[in-house]
Amino acid sequence: MFIIKYKKLFISISVVLVLLSVASIAFFGIRWGIDFTGGSQLEVTYQTNVPTQAEVATALKSANIESPTVQAVGDTGFVIKTRALTQTERESALTTLKVGHADATEKSFTTIGPSVGKELARKSIIAMIAVILGIVFYIAYSFHRVSKPVSSWAYGLIAIVTLLHDVVIPTGIFVILSKLYAVDVDTLFVVALLTILGLSVSDTIVVFDRIRENLRSRAYDTFQATVGNSINQTFTRSINTSATVILVLLSLVFFGPTSTKIFALMLASGMFFGTYSSIFLASPLLVLWESLQKKKKKE
């Protein structure tokens, strides 16, 4: 019951975290990758005498390729993302990278046009909206027989709030990481957000479902007691499940391939904050909603 007792504290923590995340997004901005803006991606590997990221970036600038994004891949490779390159510019870049490093070899090269990038961005937004609407409609339908003391649509509305919480905070973390490590937003980032939505809402539904069952059985005298005891009954399950998944994801962060580190870190942070929101945000918001409804009726 301590979660409900100190509900304003836990809600305030979530508000502060969301505001800090929004501030980081506004201040640093989002580094859109070539998946959305269009451009070229070149992967180069070296056998010996591997240059630094700064040396690679300087070499590309000397070849008139402005503002390249250079990411290390393993110990001997680099992924270079730039504006769309012509065949001549591609060959010039490779020639420049081989100066002092004759063993440099091109592993892959892809170019995405701006129209394709816009289409991916549009489909990503549609996918996010479709997932959120689907979740809300599912919750509203599942709880349509539980209309007292909180209407079924309120469960769906609160689910939206928690989902936004669970998406905004990891995005804020990602923006900071992208600033520090020159990581771009790509389709893998969108996949991570969609996965976070699914993981987050599953925890929320478990708690809401227990509240629904306790309301039906009228096991407790007040709505506050019902929610508090429902959290107690699902607390261990939620924490254990999330901790297990987070440990696996962290193992990928520290020991997995470079290409999936940020993806795994995003999922781990999303899982953590999704569990937090299910226990410490969604349920307290239900109690706060119910208390506000009572006050309105009295007035």
Image: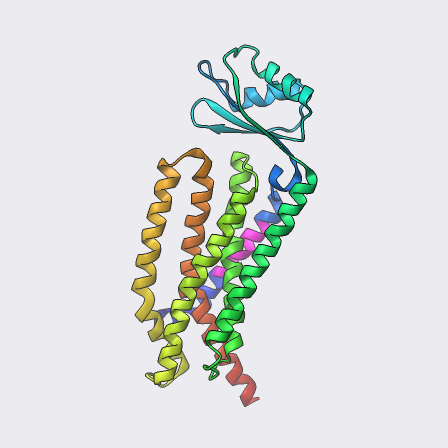
Whether residue 92 is visible here, answered yes or no, is yes
In this orientation, which residue lies closer to the viewer: 153 or 281? Answer: 153
Q: Position of residue 172 (x, y in %)?
A: 53, 49
In front: 262, or 142? 142
Q: Quadrant of the N terminus?
A: bottom left
Q: Residue at x 35, y 36 (%)?
A: 255
- In this view, 100 is above or below 22: above
Q: Residue at x 34, y 41 (%)?
A: 251
Residue 131 % position (x, y): 54, 60
Task: Confirm whether the magenta stretch covers residue 18.
Answer: yes
**Residue visible at 47% across and 60% down in the picture:** 13
Left or right: where 253 falls relative to 11? left
Residue depicted at x 55% and y 23%: 54
Q: Residue furthest bottom?
A: 298
Q: Is residue 245 above or below residue 74?
A: below
Give how far across and how far down residue 192 sits, in percent. Answer: 49, 49
Q: What is the image's colouring?
A: rainbow
| Res 235 → quadrant | bottom left
Is the C terminus in the top left, top right, bottom left or bottom right quadrant?
Answer: bottom right
Task: Magenta stretch: give its range.
Answer: 14-23
| In the image, residue 188 above or below residue 194 | above
Q: Is residue 227 visible?
A: no
| Image position of 72 with respect to 197: above or below | above
Q: Is 134 one of the magenta-colored residues?
A: no
Residue nearest the observer in this picture, 94 or 181: 94
Residue 87 percent across, percent down from the top left: 67, 22
Tell me which secondary structure the magenta stretch mostly adopts: helix
